[in-house]
């Protein structure tokens, strides 16, 4: 993680927040990407984030839906068309551009 006391860092000075994965696990139903506790607490109700995937998604998760897990709560990740993002939508370790909306429980991968 970064150098602040928050579970996310601002990449640009007070710009786009960056949230990072701490673990990736493939279950029988999903690819579970774990994020730091309270990752979204300090964010506005909706906006964009940069998401850094720090672990590769195992090949066993290529066709499984991806969910983010924070504090025991899971949130499905979707594509811009509304379909579930799957393991192959993440090209590997790297940074991804996403849109979130806390009111509608939307987490959308924009650069798939």
Image (tube, grey):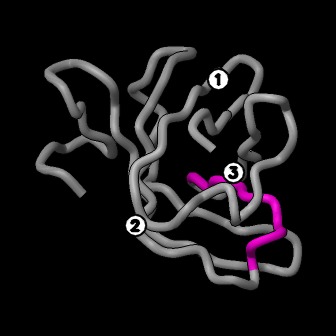
**Closest to the observer, 90 or 34:** 90
> Residue at label 3?
73
Query: Would residue 44 be found to the left or right of residue 85 on screen?
Result: left
Question: Residues at badges 1 and 2 in contact (C-beta under 8 Å)?
Answer: no
The percent position of residue 70, horizontal first and vertical second, equals 57, 52
Q: Is residue 34 magenta?
A: no
The percent position of residue 39, horizontal first and vertical second, equals 44, 42
Query: Would residue 98 be found to the left or right of residue 59 on screen?
Result: left
- Looking at the rendered image, the quarter that the N terminus falls into is bottom left
Residue located at (65% from left, 58% from top)? 72
> Residue at label 2?
54
The percent position of residue 53, horizontal first and vertical second, equals 45, 60
Classify mark 2: residues with Cα within 10 Å, few (<14), some (14-19) or many (20+): some
> Residue at label 1?
102
Residue located at (75% from left, 84% from top)? 60
When asked about the image quadrant of residue 15, the answer is top left
The percent position of residue 104, horizontal first and vertical second, equals 77, 21
- In the image, which residues are magenta? 61-70
When asked about the image quadrant of residue 42, the answer is top left
Which one is earlier in the sequence, the residue at label 1 or at label 3? 3
> Eyeballing the image, is 90 above or below 92?
above
Residue located at (67% from left, 55% from top)? 89
- Looking at the rendered image, the quarter that the C terminus falls into is top right
């Amino acid at each position: 993680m970064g150098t602040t006391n928050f579970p996310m860092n601002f990449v640009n000075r007070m710009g786009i927040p960056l949230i990072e994965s701490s673990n990736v696990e493939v279950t029988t139903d999903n690819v579970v990407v774990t994020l730091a506790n309270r990752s979204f607490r300090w964010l506005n109700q909706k906006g964009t984030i940069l998401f850094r995937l720090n672990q590769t998604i195992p090949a066993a998760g290529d066709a499984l839906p991806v969910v983010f897990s924070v504090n025991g709560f899971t949130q499905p990740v979707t594509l811009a068309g509304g379909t579930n993002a799957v393991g192959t939508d993440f090209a590997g370790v790297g940074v991804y551009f996403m849109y979130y909306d806390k009111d509608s429980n939307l987490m959308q991968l924009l650069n798939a």
